[in-house]
């Protein structure tokens, strides 16, 4: 996280689906990355950016180049979890999101995803100003 | 199934993934439809049809218009299952697959999917002869 | 659907996840069954039944024995869809749900799932009165 | 990776499922973690450890505590990919796997998962000797 400017944090509420659990009785580990994606979509919307339009109108694609999660405690079916998300770094053609997953007031998982913006030929493109200024902390 | 001509049956072997189980300890019900898709791809390949090329070279898409499954016994993590698939009907612009899922020599699930062939604007197209003659029983 | 008594219909709103789409650009067909499950959980809750508690406190499990979907029009990423669900039949140890999936005011998919109630050894059990009276139309 | 002892590397072949792709036309990022799990199961088996039996007979569970992936190039439907896996560190009650995902002879993704062994009450347990000696490089 940055020193002086605090990034805006967005909260996304989810209810754990039966499909997301595994035979251990808890949420299967890859599903947290799906929640991170839901949180990203939501986060960008809260800043006036529709990622769907970005793809369909601007021909811009947000590639995931890295993903990370740390699991601290399990969640299970029908649990209400909240994914807190914030933009943790912004560079020329890339940026990162970080996430906390809460169950009640306890953080049960943390994560990070790094993204590159590309055109529809998968060539990285410089972040357009209308995106940069909205996601900057 | 047809009277005189027996459709060719193709067998696809799968090992149940941990991700495919749920908190009941068994394979979550929607995952059988993913197995059916794997079996379809495999079945068509065994008849010389690459569905990937159909999309990429011929601009043809196999839309699913109906899907059905009956679950008779559960499967769980690391089970070896076999999906038997056959083309059960062929019409002008559509056809159906049927499936049996075996665990050992026991049928644990049965299914059916109905498909329409379309161009890339989602308009139904007549089955091209090179497809029809290969999938006909 | 039944003649005289109209079953209560419950509506569940969902936003399509990127993860739920496939390379055809639309929601992959098996994911509708996950939505049906979300709708079931929601529907039962609206009638005072927590399926989670049913499993954890009563040792009762709702097995899916049949599932069916008909796909009429596609949905894609970030679409707001609504799953309407109702109990369409109730028998001694089993019952069925039916579903309509709306995109705007258009039904894009219909479905049905049949369920058997079991104990934790997978033996069918008679529907307890507190469940039966709540789910009856 | 370790200095002197080279860990055994196991290779697991997979064919990309249609279900695993997303509307960008490529494999959705969370699915790599499912492949890592398939590779782990496979890797352990190649060393004489059935993870299924570990759970069912020994009451031991392999919790994922961290997961990481770096995506370098995309894969799409029907691609044949190979997941190479190796045990990269072994501690008292935990160990890590690393992964390379190949498409042809090109590494398209790399990953790492960290695990803790627990009993069925989620309490960490010391790696039993029969596991330790088999997974050590």
Image: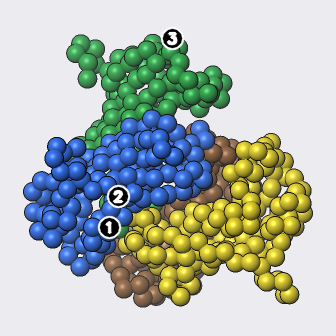
Chain colours: A green, B yellow, C brown, D blue
**In screen coordinates, is B7 left or right of C118?**
right
Image location of residue C27, percent across then percent down = 62, 49
**In screen coordinates, is A98 left or right of A64?**
left
Q: Chain of mark 2?
A: D
The C terminus of chain B: image quadrant? bottom right
To which residue does mark 3 refer? A129
Q: Looking at the picture, do discs 3 and 2 lie on one chain?
A: no
Between marks 3 and 2, how big is the CA–CA gap?
Answer: 46 Å
To which residue does mark 1 refer? D46
Identify the residue at horizontal 64%, vertical 65% (top origin). Answer: B42
Instruction: State the residue lying farthest toward the front.
Output: D4
The image quadrant of residue B24 is: bottom left
Image location of residue C10, percent across then percent down = 57, 59
Identify the residue at horizontal 53%, vertical 88% (top origin). Answer: B105
The image quadrant of residue D132 is: bottom left
To which residue does mark 2 refer? D10
Is B69 located above or below residue C77 in the figure? below
């Amino acid at each position: 996280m940055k020193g002086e400017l605090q990034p805006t944090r967005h909260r996304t509420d989810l209810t754990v689906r039966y499909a997301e659990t595994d035979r251990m009785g808890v949420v299967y580990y890859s599903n947290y990355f799906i929640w991170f994606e839901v949180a990203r979509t939501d986060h960008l919307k809260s800043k006036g950016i529709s990622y769907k339009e970005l793809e369909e109108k601007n021909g811009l694609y947000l590639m995931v180049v890295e993903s990370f999660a740390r699991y601290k405690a399990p969640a299970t079916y029908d649990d209400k979890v909240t994914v807190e998300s914030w933009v943790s770094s912004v560079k020329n053609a890339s940026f990162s999101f970080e996430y906390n997953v809460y169950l009640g007031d306890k953080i049960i998982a943390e994560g990070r995803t790094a993204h590159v913006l590309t055109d529809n030929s998968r060539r990285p493109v410089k972040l357009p100003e209308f995106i940069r200024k909205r996601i900057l902390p």
